[in-house]
Structures are given as C-alpha cells and as structure tokens.
Amino acid sequence: MQHASNIEALNSSAKVSGLIVITMLIGLNLRPALAAIGPLTSAIQQDTGMSFTAMAWLTLLPVLAMGLGCFVTLKLRQQYSLKQLVQGSLGLLVIANGLRVWDTESLAQPILLLTSLLAGTGIAVLQATLPVVIKTLAGDDSARVMGFYVSAIMGGAALAASVSPWLTSGELDWRMALAVWSLLALVALVCWQQWSSQLPQQSSGKALHHGVARSRQVSLIATFSMAAAGYVCILAWLPPFLLDLGFSATQAGLLLGYLTAVEVAAGFIFPSLASKNLDRRWVLTLVMLLSVTGFVWLALIPQWASIVFPLTLLGLGIGGQFPMVMIVTMDHHPNAQKAGSLVAVVQGYGYSLAAFMPLLMGALRDQLGQFELAWLALAGIYLVAIILVSRYNPRHYQALRSSNEDAQ
C-alpha cells in the first residue's frame, strides 16, 4: 500500500515537473514580439520615420489584442480543446514574428502593425488558456507552477531585450533581429505537440460563468489593468527613456534585460512566499510598494544615483505583481474551468484598458520631450491599486461566489 502511494506521488511529481517545463517554454514566447521593439526604437524610427506616438501603436495593438482576445478565447474553448488552442496560438506567433523579416520600404509600418496585432492575438489565447491547463493538471501546486510560468514570460522579455540590439550590431538588420524570435516559437510548438497528449482532446463545451460577484470582478479588473499599465509602459518606453539619458541602444537593451531578469527572480520569490498562506495580501502589497518606489526614483534619476537601483526595485515589483494578481484571481474559485473564465475576463478587460497607457506616454514624450511625468503618474496609479488589494481577504471568497449565484 505504501509502495503504491509512493509510486503515485512520484508520478504526480513527474507530471508537475513536465508541466513546469512546457509552460516555461511557452512562456518564453509571450513577450519577445513586444520586448524586442523598445531597444530597436532608434533603428526603426531612422528607417521608417515613425514618431514616438506611432511607435506606441506597436505596443498598443498587441496589448489590446491580448485583452480582446481573452473574450474570444472564452468562445473558442467551447469549440476547440486546450491542446488545439495552444497549438494554433504558437503557430500564429511563428507566422507573426517571421513576417517581420519582410523588407519593403513602402509597407514597413503596415507590416509592423499587422505582425504586432497577430502576435497579440496569439499571446491572448495562450494567456487565457494556460492558466486553465495549469489549474487542471497541477491542482494544489497551481501557485508554484504559475510562478515558474510567469517567470518564464519575464525571462522571454529579458532575452529579447538583451539579444535583439546585440544582433543588429553584427550582420543583421532590425528586421532580422525581430524575425529571429519565430524560431523560439517553432521550438515551443514542436515540444507542445509531443507533450500535450496528457490533455483531454474534447472542447470545454458550454461556457462556464466564473461565479464571482460583479463588484469583485470589477475590482480585480482594475487591479490587473493598473499593474499591466506599469509593465507595458516599462516594456515600451524604458529603452527610449534610457536613450534620452545618453545610453546607447545596446546599453538600453541590456538594462531592460537586467530589469526583466530581476522580474524573473521575483516571479519565483514572491509566489513561493505567498504559497505559505492563503491570504496573499501582504505579498501583493509589498510588490506594489516596490513598484511605487521604483517609478518615483526613475522620475528623479537625473538628480539621483545609479539607475540600477530604481530598475532593481521595478524588477522586483513588476515581476512579483503579475503572478500574484493572477494567483489571487484564480484563488477566487476552486473549479479550474470557472477560475480560468475569471482569469480570462480579468485579463481581457485589464489588458484592453492598459493598452492605451503607452500611447498616452508616447504622446507626452512628443509634446514635453520627457517621460518623467508619466513615471510619477504610474506611481500614483499603483497607490490606488494597493487600496484595492487590501480588500482581497480569502475568507470572503466563498461568500462572493454564493452571493453571485443567488443573484443569478
């Protein structure tokens, strides 16, 4: 009996380990299409004549697609299996990144916008689907697996930000530096096809409502959108901000890579701390405060010490906030499908709202010639998010589900 129990534990551990590996490999592909743009801003602008406001659309479109695509995914899950959705989305990333190699002066801007939209759509489906895969297969280990998965997302951003400008310093132009990330998506696609036999082939069938009270849904959406706004603005505008300070494109890319490397570490550290207690509020508040401090310091950097300090604070804060917001959202329902539906709705509205922040920052940069005011505005937004976080007491989650069911 004990022997059988040990074998079952080993099998379960092996399943979770395999899940961690495949979700991390996929996670690496969820940011290069966005993160590679920032360090190459000067080269792209020089070749295409795009303004900062126009460049902002290369972040706005994929992030908006990431938001709206979550709602589409809820419908797609009724028709297609989890395996098919992930497979199709990875294929879309291969195409989107690969098309960026197309060298044509007259269509340079439309190609960049189209590929950004395609990439955002693929990312949206993956981000709405993988939490369901994780909660279905990992069970009580979901928080730990989510930490690895989100850390890989940040790692993909660090890799793209660091490597892309380095590639252009050799024989490759900026188009090739963007297109090379299709190879990473292709590797993930091949590996997924080999591993995904563990998943059920059938679709989810009838759409499941998440069963959480509307007031809490709105609160979670607001929290996620505020957190996402800081992340996408850093991804889009930190390298141009560093260029304004006199750093080279390669240095700007490496510094963004450093920040996202810190995010990777934070993605492991904070979910691990939070896993020790079902009440995640103190951890989520801590990472939000780190972000606030980082944004304020970044705004004052010309008069202060080394830029590494605010980048470290932002890396810890932003790297910790994304997995923590996702974990807290999933905590609201024990059912994997309903938790997945809630995550999809929160991400859908959250990304859609956050998508316009880089555009606002780009317009401010064009008008004022600086980013400092935008960093301070983001610090203020995070302070509001902390107020919302204080309300996420897990003792109330069941009552929030029950009140919503009664209302229906």
Image (cartoon, rainbow, N blue to C red):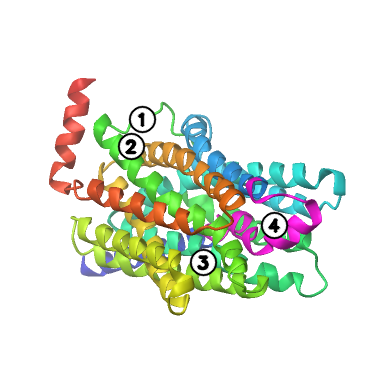
Marks 3/1 in contact by CB < 8 Å: the verdict is no
Residue 182 - label: 4
Instruction: Answer yes or no: is residue 12 visible.
Output: no
Is 88 one of the magenta-colored residues?
no
Instruction: Please identify the quarter of the rendering in which residue 38 is found.
Output: bottom right
Instruction: Answer yes or no: is residue 394 visible.
Output: yes
> What range is drawn magenta here?
26-53
Q: Which residue is mark 2?
A: 338
Residue at (60% x, 54% y) in the render: 34
How crowded is the residue under tag 1: few (<14 C-alpha within 10 Å), some, or many (20+)? Answer: some
Instruction: Please identify the quarter of the rendering in which residue 64 is found.
Output: top right
Q: Is residue 105 left or right of residue 348?
A: right
Mark sitting earlier along the chain (3/1): 3
| Residue 215 place in picture, x, y as percent | 25, 32
Cα distance between the residues tagged 2 and 3: 29 Å
Mark sitting earlier along the chain (2/3): 3
Q: Is residue 156 left or right of residue 58?
A: left
Mark sitting earlier along the chain (1/2): 1
Marks 1/2 in contact by CB < 8 Å: the verdict is yes
Figure check: 85 above or below 26: above
Where disc 3 sits, the SS reads: helix
Where disc 2 sits, the SS reads: helix
Mark sitting earlier along the chain (4/3): 3
Query: In what quadrant of the picture does the N terminus appear?
Result: bottom left
| Residue 124 place in picture, x, y as percent | 53, 43
Mark sitting earlier along the chain (1/4): 4
Cα distance between the residues tagged 1 and 2: 6 Å
Q: Which residue is mark 3?
A: 155
| Residue 224 place in picture, x, y as percent | 37, 46
Cα distance between the residues tagged 1 and 4: 34 Å
Q: Which residue is mark 1?
A: 208
Q: Amino acid at mark 1?
A: Leu
